[in-house]
Amino acid sequence: MKRVVCFLSLFISIHAFGQQIISNDSSVNAAFKLALNTVDINTRRGILAAGGDYGGEWTRDISINSWNGVSLLRPEVAESSLWSITINRDTIGHQYWDKIIWVIAAYNHYLITGDKVFLKQAYKCSANTMQALEQQELDSKYGLFKGPSVFNDGIAGYPEPIYEPGNNSSSVLDHKNSAYIKCLSTNCVYYGAYLALNNIARILNAGTSDTNNYAQKASDLKQNILKYLYDKSTNSFYYLIDQNGNAFKAQEGLGISFAVIFHVIDGEKANQLIKNAAVSKYGITSIYPDFPRNSKDKPGRHNNIVWPMVNGFFAKAAIASGDYSTFANELYNLTHLALDEDKGNYNFREVYNPYTGQPDGGWQANGNEYPEFHWESCKLQTWSATAYISMVIDGIIGLRFDESALAFAPYLPHGIDYIELKDLAYRNSVLDISIKGEGKLIKTFTVDGKASASHSFNSLTKGKHNIAIVLR
């Protein structure tokens, strides 16, 4: 598969609603512009919809999209959208099992904006929701949270006996055994939420009892994830524990990504986990391999099929683990899936076939018998677009937000030796960022022409500034 790269001395510049990307890869430029346009097209009355064919009612979609770039590039839209999926700003709403991902998105929103008024409200909302979920969904036998895996609200994402043969409902909640399972991605998200709550409590001076409480709960949950969902002999994770206590040995793309992103494992183990992951021709699939009822000809909608949102987090995990070749593979795969005429054709679609790269919504429920269970791959899917935005912003440009600064850890893959992000609003500043070279090692880092050994930009700085980075 060839990448369409324009190596012209005169670089192509693309304006995208206030932010401008300039690089020597015309395909990356076009895909980034398309991604940001998709976000803006799907913003309805100030609320970000899940896609061209969906509304804005899903907590997971809004949270993931805010986390993956909307809080940075469209902060007002992100904030309004985050509040829209709460109940009176008091608790988080919608489907129960993965709604706690909102806490992670809210904390990330604060790191970008520095808005403590928002953070105080978000802390109350997050703490109330976590307390309720602990009472209702924490399995005391395992010390793990019950419920389906993140985003997999369709039964196609689950093997038997969670899937009940003869039950043709597509909703996982209509298959009764799903209420008792413990999934990798869901528990990693709870762990990330505990870490976020701990940091928010510290920032707001909520008291040592709160911070110690969340820190201890995070530590306990991490230990239980490693005890029940990790096979240290093979350095691999199980997808889930079913209602009978059996661990299901399948690769959950989102689960292993979150395990690395939140440092459930790190170092060489994290690197090898990502490097050794099974990846299709067009990127990592949601759950690998096919369940017995699915096949290459009829892939399950949430099974062995490409969801670009999952690929975005897998790329983020690759960067976090130091596996840059895997990151580049996912970046260029999604570029082609979005742009190529025989694939997305300048449209970020919801789901793609892992063998052909064509839009394919996959088969749901008992799809091998009933053609009506073959679903469409919806158009203008927001989290497919924000996955790409994250690959560029977090991966190539390497933005890292903390409470007091914006740090940089860029990576220029082979084929991109120059990129600029112009007119980036960050707190009280507007930044023009340029990166030259190849790889990840920073040779020089300057702010307005002055060298900075910290490779960061202070969050209290105001006005227009230029950041120039040269890589070795």
Image (cartoon, helix red, strand yellow):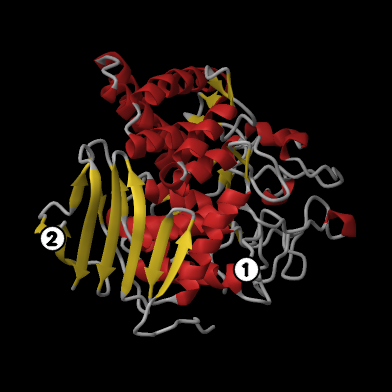
In the image, is 38 to the left or to the right of 175?
left
Please state, as top left, top right, bottom left or bottom right, where the N terminus lies in the image: bottom right
**Mark closer to the observer (2, 1):** 2
Residue 70, given in percent of the width and then of the height, sits at: 48, 45
Residue depicted at x 51% and y 21%: 129
Assess whether mark 1 and mark 2 are in contact (beta carbons under 8 angstroms).
no
Q: Tell me the SS state at disc 1.
A: loop
Please tell me whether residue 181 is drawn above or below residue 420 in the rendered image: above
Residue 430, given in percent of the width and then of the height, sits at: 30, 48
User: Is residue 253 something that shows in the picture?
Assistant: no
Mark sitting on residue 449: 2
In the image, is 59 to the left or to the right of 166?
left
In the image, is 385 to the left or to the right of 52?
left
Which sits earlier in the primary sequence, circle 2 or circle 1?
1
Residue 291, given in percent of the width and then of the height, sits at: 69, 58
| Amino acid under disc 2 | Gly
Q: Residue 236 is drawn in which quadrant?
A: bottom left
Kindly report the distance in space between the C-alpha atoms of the residues bearing marks 2 and 1.
38 Å
Q: Tell me the SS state at disc 2.
A: loop
User: Is residue 361 something that shows in the picture?
Assistant: yes
Please state, as top left, top right, bottom left or bottom right, where the C terminus lies in the image: bottom left
Q: Nearer the viewer, residue 15 or 284?
A: 15
Residue depicted at x 43% and y 36%: 104
Please tell me whether residue 132 is drawn above or below residue 419 in the rendered image: above
Q: Which residue is mark 1?
A: 346
